[in-house]
Amino acid sequence: MKTIRNFIAGEFVSSGATFEKRSPVNNEVISTVAEASREDVDKAVASARTALRGSWAKIPLADRSELLYAVANEMTRRFDDFVEAETADTGMPASVARHAFVPRGAANFKIFADMVKNVPTETYEMATPDGKGALNYSVRRPVGVVGVICPWNAPLLLMTWKVAPALACGNTVVVKPSEESPQSAALLGEVMNTVGIPKGVYNVVNGFGPGSAGEFVTTHPGVNAITFTGETRTGAEISKAAAVGARPVSLEMGGKNAGIIFADCDFDAAIEGTLRSSFVNTGQVCLGTERLYVERPLFERFVSALKAGAENMKIGAPFDASVAMGPMISHEQRNKVLSYYKKAVEAGATVVTGGGVPTVSPELASGAWVQPTIWTGLPENASILREEIFGPCCHITPFDTEEEVLALANDTTYGLSATLWTSNLSRAHRMAGALEAGIIWVNSWFLRDLRTAFGGMKQSGIGREGGVHSLEFYTELKNICIKL
Ligand SMILES: NC(=O)C1=CN([C@@H]2O[C@H](COP(=O)(O)OP(=O)(O)OC[C@H]3O[C@@H](n4cnc5c(N)ncnc54)[C@H](O)[C@@H]3O)[C@@H](O)[C@H]2O)C=CC1
Ligand SMILES: O=C(O)/C=C/C=C(\O)C(=O)O
């Protein structure tokens, strides 16, 4: 069993209270985690403030960028440790951690280490009445101490997506990992010390939301900006906290994303992509497609191929290389998902496959397992089609026209992503332009260029991160006007 401590001013520390982290695979306690008190958060913020004005500020941009490359390289050297941490905490198949989420952790540091050196700012020469003129130019400055509040579904990827640009821009951070996934953030503390990131630049405080470390960080007056990924309801609470002191906030929140499959698509690619978009990481992906719309001539064939694909996915423990789907993160999440499985039946859904708990080997029986599930036949106002379930499930609705499916896809309070499968380029352009979502994929899913804007419309988010958009959030742009 591991002991996970807070990481403050370059030291692993704990001050009393602890909580248990249980394995999603078998419900055994896998670590005891130090819960940060308000005083611990005070210390973390103070250490971040000291580094912001001191050691970190003194390092020139090019050297800062080199240091972040060193972080990425050390993460790669400790690749297996990160895979172990991610799979132990979340139950995700090791293959998913290995091929997608852990490499993205290192990639996040490299992209922003490069980007921060290559972004120009603006200059304007202006006329003045005396004819001598003036010169305006702008510079970027760090926003300050950034509070980073993270979810559990892709802990390393989503944390480094914020920490890396924050540090690249010269900020310091106080990270609050999810209570469900504390390991990777602690491991990153070891990496920071190994490569010589100054003490206090990266701090980690563990705990929960309200009345615990999450609230202590987001309400702390010494935190200058807050970046959050998680549920829409939590984001709304964090917005309120950020309003005190008029602090900038970036919110990446839930989704109820549509996958739209036209009859002219590459069928095999659409099935393969949809199996991933609906079921990878046991459906615990904010970009996942829980609402599928299939053009009527293809409907029966698509439903039956997706069913076959879902039934073919091996469910089991993360380190078995043949496993395609692990457990849910916790029994709490499983119960939430199973309650939707029940609601679907009560609302009159046809259960195409799944709908319950799979049979697993006796040593896994206490884990948080659910079956991948496909429904058809529900009306668009059913809760299954309106609320984010965040599980391995999708509902498939047939459609007849482009206008009809566009209206259906946009009829949601969310707007994170949408996925289109079609070989008609004009239609792809038309639909992509009209869909109300921050990220549109055509004939692909989760294909990520880290220079692009990432974020959601409507209740899926406020602001964009990624590429220069992250630099906008993590810096203050200052104009300097010089009268010549
Ligand atoms: N748009 C995006 O990029 C992504 C969004 N998500 C969303 O995240 C959710 C799943 O993650 P969860 O961890 O369950 O989200 P959550 O909102 O329950 O928790 C996220 C983090 O916020 C903290 N927290 C909770 N209440 C708080 C409060 N009042 N003040 C400060 N901190 C608080 C939690 O301890 C945790 O660290 C899903 O809704 C999913 O769609 C997940 C990944 C990506
Ligand atoms: O690629 C990103 O920046 C975000 C990815 C989000 C997930 O991996 C997730 O929600 O699981």
Image: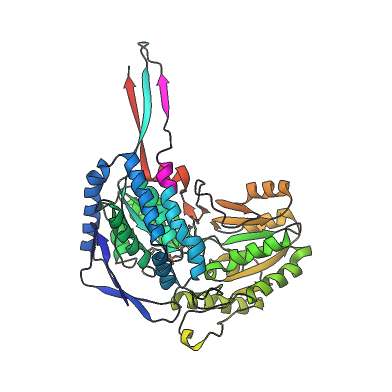
State the residue lying farthest toward the top.
131
- Give the camera-side residue of 134 and 243: 134
- Give the camera-side residue of 38 and 44: 44
Residue located 49% across and 74% down the image: 318
Instruction: For the C terminus, give its image quadrant.
Output: top left
Percent position of residue 149, x then y: 37, 59
Residue located 24% across and 57% down the image: 10
State the residue lying farthest toward the bottom.
362
> Image quarter for residue 150?
bottom left
In this view, 250 is above or below 291: above
In this view, 116 is above or below 421: above
Q: Is residue 16 shown left or right of residue 259?
A: left
Residue 298 visible from this viewpoint? yes
- Give the camera-side residue of 98 and 89: 98
Percent position of residue 231, x then y: 45, 63
Q: Is residue 117 found inside the magenta-colored segment of the image?
A: yes
Q: Is residue 148 shown left or right of residue 354?
A: left
> Image quarter for residue 235?
bottom left
Residue located 43% across and 55% down the image: 106
Q: How is the image coloured?
A: rainbow
State the residue lying farthest toward the right.
297
Residue located 21% across and 58% down the image: 43
Percent position of residue 219, x then y: 29, 57
Q: Is residue 97 shown left or right of residue 288?
A: left
Labels in figure, total: 0
Percent position of residue 137, x then y: 37, 27
Instruction: For the N terminus, give its image quadrant.
Output: bottom left
Residue 142 visible from this viewpoint? no
Q: Is residue 98 found inside the magenta-colored segment of the image?
A: no
> Image quarter for residue 308?
bottom right
User: In the rendered structure, which segment of residues is drawn in magenta?
Assistant: 111-128
